[in-house]
Image: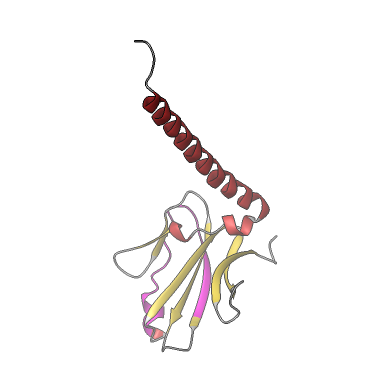
Amino acid sequence: MGQVPETAKRTQSRFGRGVIVIVLLIAVVIGGRFLQGRFDPAMAARAPDCLELSDEGLSYTNICEAEINFRYCFTTTPGTGLQNCETIALAPDETSHSLFDEYRAANADGVHEYACEAPYLPVRIQSYTDRHVDIDACRLDPENP
């Protein structure tokens, strides 16, 4: 009467293996992010989620607890790429000036923004996999290492 049926043992065994696999996957993801930050700090400095667009005036707020460097570029006619780019530093909870006047003066049809944690600067670089494509990245400021 005290014996566990064979099917119950197999179910417990499968459940136990599933838990181990899930724990290992979580450990690999967390460990990978930690190692990535150690070996490639520029990759870990990406902070596009720190920007919040205000409801009025086309201004951005740093919603993270770290200082960021915020780069914005205006897009104009198709095929001309990003133009009138500027980078500004934003402290935590600081809001940028309104980009609306610059946007109108450039006759822009869009804004491209990117942010990196200080002291890294947002830049556009050639893609690692396709030399015809530029991607956003973070690089150390050569003037302020």
On the image, the x and y values in percent for residue 97 come to 41, 67
Q: Is residue 101 magenta?
A: yes
Tell me which residue sits at (47%, 40%) in the image: 22
Outermost residue to the left: 55
Q: In which quarter of the image is residue 123?
A: bottom right
137 relative to 18 in the view: left or right: right
Q: Position of residue 68 (x, y in %)?
A: 52, 58
Q: Which residue appears at 57% of the width and 49% of the height? A: 33
Q: Residue at x 52, y 51 (%)?
A: 66
The magenta stretch spans which residues? 84-104
Is 119 covered by the magenta stretch?
A: no
Tell me the quarter of the image containing the N terminus. top left
Residue 86 lies, in percent from the top left, at 52, 74
In the figure, is residue 34 to the left or right of 47? right
Residue positioned 40% across, 85% down in the render: 105
Report the quarter where the C terminus lies.
bottom right
Question: Does residue 105 lie above or below 61 as drawn?
Answer: below
Q: Nearer the viewer, residue 94 or 54?
A: 54
